[in-house]
């Protein structure tokens, strides 16, 4: 039995590709339904699965993949006055948590691949916000090279641990809104530079006036890459 609950979309009988899309903080697999419905309509030969975190934030009903707030009680990471370097270091402190969670996510991916008879070359890992950080850590620490990794409104989190865990270098696509002040847009250059400095090919899509949310243009972009 899988560690994570999940929903599946699209071709679940004989898919040619697998997309694993990871939800963000304060979100769930159900919240992704409209976006995954669109993605599945654009990728009729693919199966899309959306795992749901089994971890709650402290004693609340809020779902999260890891607890970055433990290192940022004052929420400085979302303050426009906070420097990029300080924001990066806040997320860096979550490295040990991310290492553990990425291993669990890779085990989940293994299960989905076995279920649908697919391999890493036919697998794509994606996520939004905290899910984007999970997607990056998962794809880069995975033993096999997946077909691609899409990070929507994310940042390279846990960079020091990720540098030690990095064993795979799939193509990475960083998608970010220029009006995002939650995972601040100004951190995008750090993520790009970190990935390039570690030998990872990265392509960037930036969106004018986009705040911290998923939009159809991002879903369409993903579908175009996965179809290739």
Image (cartoon, rainbow, N blue to C red):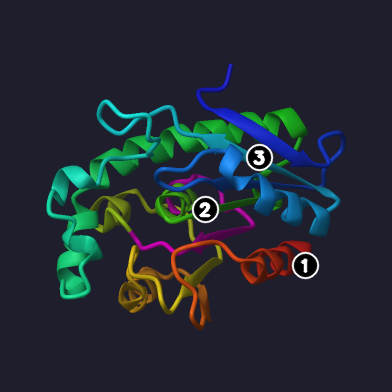
Q: Say whether residue 154 is magenta.
A: yes
- In the rendered image of this protein, does residue 111 appear above or below residue 224? above
| Dot placed on the residue nearer the N-terminal end, 3 or 2 | 3
Residue at the image position 34 percent from the left and 48 percent from the top:
165
Counting from the top left corner in percent of width and height, residue 121 is at 68, 52
Label ID, residue 127: 2
Residue at the image position 41 percent from the left and 62 percent from the top:
154
Say which element carries label 2.
Answer: strand
Left or right of residue 222, residue 175 in this image:
left
Q: Say whether residue 152 is magenta.
A: yes
Image quarter in which the N terminus is found: top right
Counting from the top left corner in percent of width and height, residue 152 is at 50, 63
Residue at the image position 49 percent from the left and 61 percent from the top:
169
For disc 1, the marked residue is: 228
Highlighted range, magenta: 140-156
Say which of 59 and 70 sits in front. 59
């Amino acid at each position: 039995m899988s560690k994570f609950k999940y929903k599946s979309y699209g071709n679940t009988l004989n898919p040619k590709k697998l997309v694993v899309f990871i939800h963000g903080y304060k979100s769930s697999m159900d919240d992704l339904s409209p976006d995954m419905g669109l993605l599945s309509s654009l990728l009729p030969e693919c199966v899309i699965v959306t795992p749901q975190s089994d971890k709650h934030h402290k004693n609340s009903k809020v779902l999260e993949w890891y607890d970055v707030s433990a290192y940022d009680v004052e929420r400085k990471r979302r303050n426009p006055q906070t420097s990029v370097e300080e924001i990066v270091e806040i997320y860096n402190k979550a490295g040990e948590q991310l290492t553990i969670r990425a291993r669990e996510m890779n085990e989940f991916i293994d299960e989905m691949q076995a279920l649908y008879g697919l391999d890493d070359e036919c697998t794509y890992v994606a996520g939004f916000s905290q899910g984007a950080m999970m997607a990056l850590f998962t794809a880069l620490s995975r033993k096999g090279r997946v077909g691609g990794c899409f990070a929507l409104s994310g940042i390279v989190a846990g960079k020091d641990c990720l540098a030690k865990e990095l064993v795979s270098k799939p193509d990475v696509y960083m998608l970010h809104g220029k009006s995002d002040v939650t995972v601040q847009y100004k951190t995008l250059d750090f993520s790009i530079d970190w990935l390039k400095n570690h030998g990872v090919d990265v392509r960037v899509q930036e969106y004018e006036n986009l705040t911290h949310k998923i939009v159809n243009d991002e879903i369409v972009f993903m579908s175009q890459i996965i179809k290739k």
